[in-house]
Amino acid sequence: MKPKLVVLTGAGISAESGLRTFRDSDGLWEGHDVYEVASPSGWQQNPSLVQEFYNLRRKDVLAARPNAAHTGLAALEQWYDVRIITQNIDDLHERGGSSRVLHLHGEILKMRSVHDETKLYDIREDIAMGQVAPDGGQFRPHVVWFGEDVSMIQPAVLEIVQADIFVLIGTSLNVYPAAGLVNYLRADVPRYIIDKKIPPVSDSHDWTLIEKPATEGVGELLRLLRP
C-alpha cells in the first residue's frame, strides 16, 4: 500500500500556465465585479454576460498547458497514492498526468441544465443562450458560483481525514468551505505549504513552508518526498 498523499490546490498552481487568479486582480475579473459574473444573482440579472464570461474562461483553459507543478504532482504517483483536491475549474491536473482529481468548484469543460446539477455534458465550444438540455433547462457552466452549495466538500473531507501526507499549493485559504478542509487533518500528518506568499495558518510551526512559485516549490517537494 502506497502512503496516501493528499494535495489541495488553488489558483496559484494554474497561474504559471497563464490563467489569471482572482486574488491578483483586485476583486475584478475582466472589469466585472465577481458577483456580476459568478453568482446566482448575477445569472438572474444578466445570464448572457455570465455565459460570455465563462465562454472566455473556457477558451483560456483550452489554450493553456500544464506546467511543471502539474506534471511534478503526477510524477509522485510512482511512490504515493496521490489524491488531488482542486479549487480550480481547469483540467490542467488531468492533462498533467494526475489520475485522481476531485474538483471542488466544478469544471469549465462541462455544462449542465439550470434544473439539474447532477447530469453533466462535455463542452469545449461556447455555450449559447437558448441552448437547452433534454429537460428543457438552459445549459450553464458546471461551475460553483459564490453562494451555491459545494456538493463535493464531503468527498473531499473523506480524502483529507485519510491523508498520510498533506500538501497545500497556491491557495490563499480565503474561500470557504474549501479553506476549512485543513481542519480535518489528523494531528500527526506531515504537512507542506507551497506558495509564493505563504497564507496564514494558525499552526504554522507544524508546516514545512516552501515560499516559492508552484513550479519551483513542487520541484523542491519532489526532492523532499522522493524515497
Image: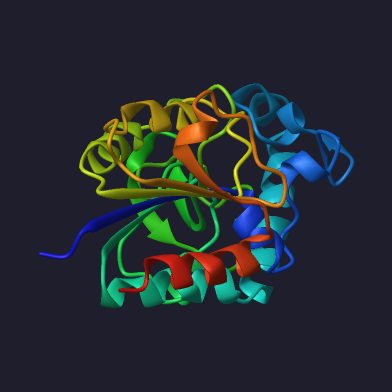
* Residue 118 visible in the picture: yes
Q: Quadrant of residue 38?
A: top right
Name the residue at 72% across, 36% down.
37
User: In the image, is 158 to the left or to the right of 63?
Assistant: left
Q: Position of residue 137 (x, y in %)?
A: 45, 39
Q: Position of residue 87 (x, y in %)?
A: 51, 45
36 or 223, nearer to the observer = 223
User: In the image, is 129 to the left or to the right of 87?
Assistant: right
Name the residue at 72% across, 45% down.
197
Name the residue at 62% across, 77% down.
65
Q: Position of residue 79 (x, y in %)?
A: 26, 73
Q: Position of residue 25 (x, y in %)?
A: 84, 43
Q: Quadrant of residue 68?
A: bottom right
Q: Which quadrant, please, contains the C terminus?
A: bottom left
174 or 167, nearer to the observer = 167
Name the residue at 44% across, 26% down.
180
Q: Which quadrant, please, contains the N terminus?
A: bottom left
Is 14 above or below relative to 120? below
